[in-house]
């Protein structure tokens, strides 16, 4: 796995975050796009480069791939910023007299339906269900999974829809609103040594009202009423604040936002509550192996290095200064006055208003920020970061073993046009033939490998860049750690000996330029955050292009970086469950309080790694990548008169295959998405069949890895997962080589027989996944709720028992049963003709060559009807005995989603969620500080509507949390009573705006349409239909929903509570506390199977 341009995590404080590459912009509406632009050009007072023929030669191990492109005339009026040729937005840089730099972005797609731009002043006045799933993804932890890191999710960990299809949203258009982000050029590196975490604390306190808007909740309440939301995060060298809102209310939102940087109150009475919020955030990550390792790396850095800090902050670090007589509010104001001036601030605003309007608003609202100028903060460092020759062995929370190796590089911020680390990560992280990972897999020593420089502040900062290799080991790999690292250094020796190869650079450059030219749009708030951050990193003209730029080949710089990847410049950590806590040299990390040991690496080992005597002959440079596309033409077909919103249609329907098809007439991009769901016989009939199917999918995915990896490098991605009663394969990316990949996969599946060696590795990995399942209380509570509700589900303990007895012959003998009778439902969408879609689907069907599945296509998943008028509770202890957090979830079952007849019910249900979310957060999180993580969420479980309230708390026991949630629900009736007609209408209008928004890109449209197919609802314009219902919905209907389904005395109440008890809630009175939840009004569920056997189920709809 290669980590190249990982996007920034948008949660508060996220050290060591390595995630999937950011996708910026949207695709072109041009009908013919050929080739790859190597150098985007802009107006700069000189004649534009136009109609220039560019030839890019990709020489892969002697093979040559020639890609020709005709560079278009890239005129960019009113814009000094280089952007993608397919980007229709307009940009303008604005410098205010006080020193603030703003990037203003006019997005022509953010408009009213009439095309009028909103300009609302004060007096003018997604649906995104949290879908439950059937692939048991919630029960497996994703925190340290490299599939999740690479792809933003994996088959085991994705939140998926109720019918098992991984989606981001369920029934409509995603939010596309106005957004703004302001990044301040100071972060946790500037924390005073006597008040660690102070800048993270300041980030929290800044939201607590301003002189102009003194109400603590004014900002969040305003955004909530107008369909928006906000957040912030603290990095090492910058702190970013951002929001999104209906564009008609952008100006008043900017007014509230700007005041945090002009006259924040930083209220003394709010400080204790926000200290608790920071501490709750810290406690929520106490059991995170990745966070713990990151903090150990900080603690053990040179004491003068900026890494040597505790950037999270907690009650201890923020309260001890008070005990020493430090005025913490005065300290906050001192830091704010010193660093929060306009010269350190970069603002991005994205909306549909003309640039002149945005310019006038920003000038009016942000010119009041205190002036300031000067150079950015820098934390230069020379010399070693860590003491060389040391091995840090760390006890893990999860059952896992992984090696983390870091080589510090100098700060390479100014080398962004060369990106030497991308060249190295492309090779070290490669997974094809001849790669390090391929050899480690051959030996059965590793299951995952990632390499590269992440996007987090600890990985890229003025003190240096950190090149990180993570290798996840099998049990035998742990025994062979020295040999694993031997092979890594042999591979690096090979790279140094053959020297930097320009053809590799050209191949990466081709892919990067291709991605830049045809890059797809992302959410405005994420886009605003990325660009506000980039304004600190790149020259203004490259604030967009800088992430993609790979213009210069500098082999000497690459070689110099390779020369730094030596043992004497290495930080080596091994995180493992196999840890001897009784050893004499065990130390305890002071903040997270976990055990570790520091060992000297033997001199002979260091010498062997420094200069390997030979290189394993199985290690060599990558071969030619057959999946690199060269044809980017758009299939025109006969689509000119077709409505862009026309639904998919069935073009093939027989006993084995139902094929849906829709050409891309909206985005006109050279991409195609091909989704296949294969329903099988026996996958869910027994626990044994379930486990065997899981194993088969893992083995197949493992065997396909080298092929799928090469396709992924060529921007043709895939996922293979076990969902519902079978397999789901998704292929998505550039169209040209997608038929080739589909054919190769189909041929492989047809002849696939797993080997004993790979079976043992995959069995070990699945066993480990079972052991690590539900380690987080939040995941555990979701898993238990679904176990109670789903008719077809198998306990993890039962699966473990079955898995322990299986061998490879069991999988081989089960496969004919699994694939002997099948039914395929497929959806092909994008840049392909109807004939091409039929050909691809037929190849896939023929490869399986099975008999039809009986009753194919019939709904199968049944959900329990929680008995009327009663409240049920299930209690359990957290799996991790030292997990301090408890999870409490109150689930209210509402009704069945009956398609057309439920449209109005769904609209009312969504509106209720919009109205309740902000007061719930304000009351229980901001005011009462029950816990850092809480949610009030509409849930859709196999088309059964429900609603859940969840709180994760390390401070309070489940009975107390339940009491506070129920009190809030009870008093919420008064909130509805007191709501004015104008306030109610603002929620209605905001939700209509959300539902009427169109998709950002082809993938979002595909997912939205596929969800309707998977759920067997087939209302492809459901969001617009619900928006029409919203126009006539009254407050009385929302109150009726509340009275019918949420009040204790209602005969229609169906209520289920799940409590996962953390260690802080367990003590001498633990049993008494649990008994306090047992009374005449609450019925305890002790045996899940018995409870389900004694109650009814809804008819299956999907």
Image (cartoon, helix red, strand yellow):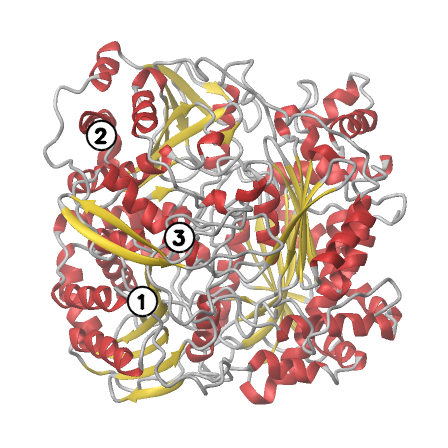
Q: Which of marks 1 and 3 is nearer the N terminus?
A: 3
Looking at the picture, how far across and down is residue 730, in whole percent? 34, 66
Residue plotted at (59% across, 31% down): 236
Crowd band around label 3 with a 10 angstrom C-alpha radius: few (<14), some (14–19), many (20+): some
N-term mark: 2 or 3: 3
Closer to the camera in the image, 295 or 114 = 114
Q: Of the residues under marks 1 and 2, which one precedes in the sequence?
A: 2
Q: Quadrant of the N terminus?
A: top left
Residue 180 point in image, percent of width and height: 68, 52
Relative height, residue 435 to residue 409 (above, below): below
Q: Crowding near pointer 2: few (<14 within 10 Å), some, many (20+)? A: some
Q: What element carries label 1?
A: loop
Tell me, yes or no, whether the two marked residues, 1 and 3, touch with CB atoms within 8 Å. no
In the image: residue 161, left or right of residue 824: right
- On screen, residue 1070 above or below 521: above
Whether residue 445 is visible to the viewer of this picture, yes or no, is: no
Is label 1 or label 3 in front? 1
* CA separation in Å, label 1 and label 2: 33 Å
Disc 2 target residue: 495
Give me the disc on residue 347: none
Residue sitting at the far top: 603
Residue occupied by mark 1: 735
User: In this rendering, is residue 318 above or below 694?
Assistant: above
- Residue lying at the far left in this picture: please name it: 617
Residue 384 locus on image (x, y percent): 43, 14
Picture quadrant where residue 583 is located: top left
* Quarter of the figure with the C terminus: bottom left
The one of 791 and 451 positioned closer to us in this rendering: 451
Q: Is residue 350 among what the camera can see?
A: yes
Label 3: which residue?
Answer: 151
């Amino acid at each position: 796995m290669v980590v190249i341009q990982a996007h920034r995590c948008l949660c508060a404080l996220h050290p060591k975050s390595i995630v999937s590459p950011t996708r910026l912009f949207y695709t072109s509406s041009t009908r013919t796009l050929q080739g790859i632009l190597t150098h985007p050009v802009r107006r700069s007072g000189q004649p534009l480069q136009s109609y220039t023929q560019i030839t890019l030669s990709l020489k892969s191990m002697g093979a040559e791939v020639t890609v020709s492109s005709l560079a278009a005339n890239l005129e960019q009026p009113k814009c000094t910023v280089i952007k993608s040729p397919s980007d229709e937005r307009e940009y303008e840089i604005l410098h205010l007299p006080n020193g603030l730099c703003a990037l203003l972005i006019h997005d022509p797609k953010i408009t009213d339906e009439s095309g009028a731009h909103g300009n609302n002043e004060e007096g003018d006045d997604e649906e995104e269900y949290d879908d439950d799933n059937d692939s048991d993804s919630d029960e497996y932890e994703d925190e340290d999974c490299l599939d999740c890191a690479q792809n933003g999710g994996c088959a085991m960990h994705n939140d998926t829809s109720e019918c098992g299809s991984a989606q981001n949203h369920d029934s409509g258009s995603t939010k596309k609103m106005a957004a703004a982000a302001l990044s301040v050029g100071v972060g946790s590196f500037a924390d005073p040594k006597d008040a660690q975490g102070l800048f993270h604390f300041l980030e929290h306190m800044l939201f607590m009202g301003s002189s102009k808007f003194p109400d603590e909740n004014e900002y969040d309440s305003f955004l909530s009423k107008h369909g928006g939301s906000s957040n912030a995060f603290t990095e090492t060298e910058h702190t970013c604040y951002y929001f999104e809102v209906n564009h008609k209310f952008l100006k008043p939102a900017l007014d509230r936002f700007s005041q945090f940087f002009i006259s924040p109150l930083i209220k003394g009475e709010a400080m204790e509550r926000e200290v608790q919020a920071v501490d709750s955030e810290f406690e929520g990550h106490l059991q995170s192996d990745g966070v713990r390792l990151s903090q150990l790396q900080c603690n053990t850095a040179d004491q003068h290095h900026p890494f040597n800090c505790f950037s999270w902050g907690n009650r201890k670090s923020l309260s001890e200064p008070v005990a020493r007589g430090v005025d913490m509010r005065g300290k906050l104001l001192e830091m704010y006055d010193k660093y929060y001036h306009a010269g350190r601030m970069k603002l991005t605003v994205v909306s549909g208003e003309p640039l002149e309007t945005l310019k006038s608003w920003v000038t009016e609202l942000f010119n009041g920020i205190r002036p300031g100028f000067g150079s950015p903060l820098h934390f230069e460092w020379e010399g070693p970061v860590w003491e060389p020759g040391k091995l840090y062995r760390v006890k893990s929370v999860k059952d896992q073993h992984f090696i983390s190796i870091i080589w510090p590089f100098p700060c390479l911020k100014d080398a962004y046009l060369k990106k030497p680390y991308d060249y190295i990560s492309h090779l070290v992280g490669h997974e094809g033939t001849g790669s390090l990972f391929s050899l480690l897999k051959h030996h059965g020593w590793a299951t995952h490998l990632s390499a590269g420089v992440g996007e987090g502040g600890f990985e890229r900062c003025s003190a240096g860049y950190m090149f990180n290799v993570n290798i996840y080991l099998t049990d035998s790999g742990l025994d062979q750690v020295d040999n694993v690292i031997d092979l890594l250094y042999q591979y690096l020796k090979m790279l140094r000996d053959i020297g930097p190869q320009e053809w590799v650079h050209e191949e990466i450059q081709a892919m990067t330029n291709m991605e830049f030219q045809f890059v797809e749009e992302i959410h405005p708030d994420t886009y605003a955050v990325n660009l506000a951050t980039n304004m600190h990193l790149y020259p203004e003209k490259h604030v967009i292009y800088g992430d993609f730029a790979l213009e210069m080949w500098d082999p000497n710089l690459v070689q110099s970086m390779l020369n730094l990847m030596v043992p004497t410049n290495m930080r080596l950590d091994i995180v493992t469950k196999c840890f001897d806590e009784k050893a004499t040299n065990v130390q305890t990390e002071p903040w997270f309080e976990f055990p570790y040991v520091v060992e000297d690496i033997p001199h002979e080992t260091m010498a062997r790694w420094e200069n390997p005597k030979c290189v394993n002959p199985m290690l060599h440079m990558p071969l030619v990548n057959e999946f690199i596309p060269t044809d980017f033409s758009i299939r025109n077909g006969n689509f000119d008169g077709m409505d862009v919103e026309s639904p998919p249609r069935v073009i093939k329907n027989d006993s084995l295959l139902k094929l849906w098809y829709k050409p891309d007439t909206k985005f006109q991009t050279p991409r195609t998405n091909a989704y296949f769901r294969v329903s099988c016989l026996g996958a869910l009939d027994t626990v044994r069949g379930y486990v065997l199917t899981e194993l088969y999918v893992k083995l197949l995915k493992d065997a396909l890895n080298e092929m799928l990896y090469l396709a992924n490098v060529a921007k043709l991605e895939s996922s293979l997962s076990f969902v519902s009663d079978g397999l789901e394969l998704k292929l998505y990316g550039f169209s040209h080589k997608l038929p080739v990949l589909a054919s190769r996969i189909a041929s492989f599946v047809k002849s696939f027989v797993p080997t004993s060696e790979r079976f043992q590795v995959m069995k070990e990995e699945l066993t480990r996944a079972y052991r690590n399942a539900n380690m987080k209380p939040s995941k555990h509570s979701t898993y238990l709720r679904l176990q109670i509700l789903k008719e077809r589900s198998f306990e993890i303990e039962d699966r473990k028992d079955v898995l322990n007895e299986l061998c490879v012959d069991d999988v081989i003998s089960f496969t004919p049963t699994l694939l002997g009778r099948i039914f395929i439902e497929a959806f092909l969408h994008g840049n392909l003709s109807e004939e091409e879609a039929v050909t691809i689907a037929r190849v896939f069907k023929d490869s399986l060559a099975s008999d039809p599945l009986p009753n194919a296509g019939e709904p199968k998943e049944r959900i329990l009807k929680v008995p009327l008028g009663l409240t049920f509770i299930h209690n359990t202890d957290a799996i991790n005995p030292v997990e301090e957090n408890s999870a409490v979830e109150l689930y209210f079952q509402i009704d069945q989603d009956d398609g057309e007849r439920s449209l109005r019910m769904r609209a009312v249900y969504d509106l209720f969620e919009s109205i309740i979310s902000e007061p719930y957060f304000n009351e229980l999180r901001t005011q009462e500080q029950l816990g850092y993580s809480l949610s009030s969420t509409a849930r859709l479980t196999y088309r059964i509507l429900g609603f859940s309230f969840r709180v994760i708390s390390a401070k309070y026991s489940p009975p107390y949390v339940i009491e506070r949630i129920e009190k809030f629900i009870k008093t919420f009736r008064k909130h509805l009573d007191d709501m004015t007609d104008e306030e109610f209408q603002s929620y209605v209008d905001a939700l209509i705006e959300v539902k009427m928004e169109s998709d950002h890109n082809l993938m979002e449209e595909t997912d939205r349409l596929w969800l309707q197919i998977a759920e067997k609802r087939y209302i492809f314009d459901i969001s617009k239909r619900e928006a029409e219902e919203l126009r006539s919905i009254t407050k009385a209907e929302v109150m009726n929903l509340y009275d019918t389904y949420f009040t204790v005395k209602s005969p229609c109440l169906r209520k289920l509570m799940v409590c996962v008890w953390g260690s802080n809630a367990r003590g001498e009175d633990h049993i008494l506390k649990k008994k306090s939840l047992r009374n005449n009004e609450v019925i305890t569920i002790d045996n899940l199977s018995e409870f389900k056997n004694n109650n009814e189920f809804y008819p299956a709809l999907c």
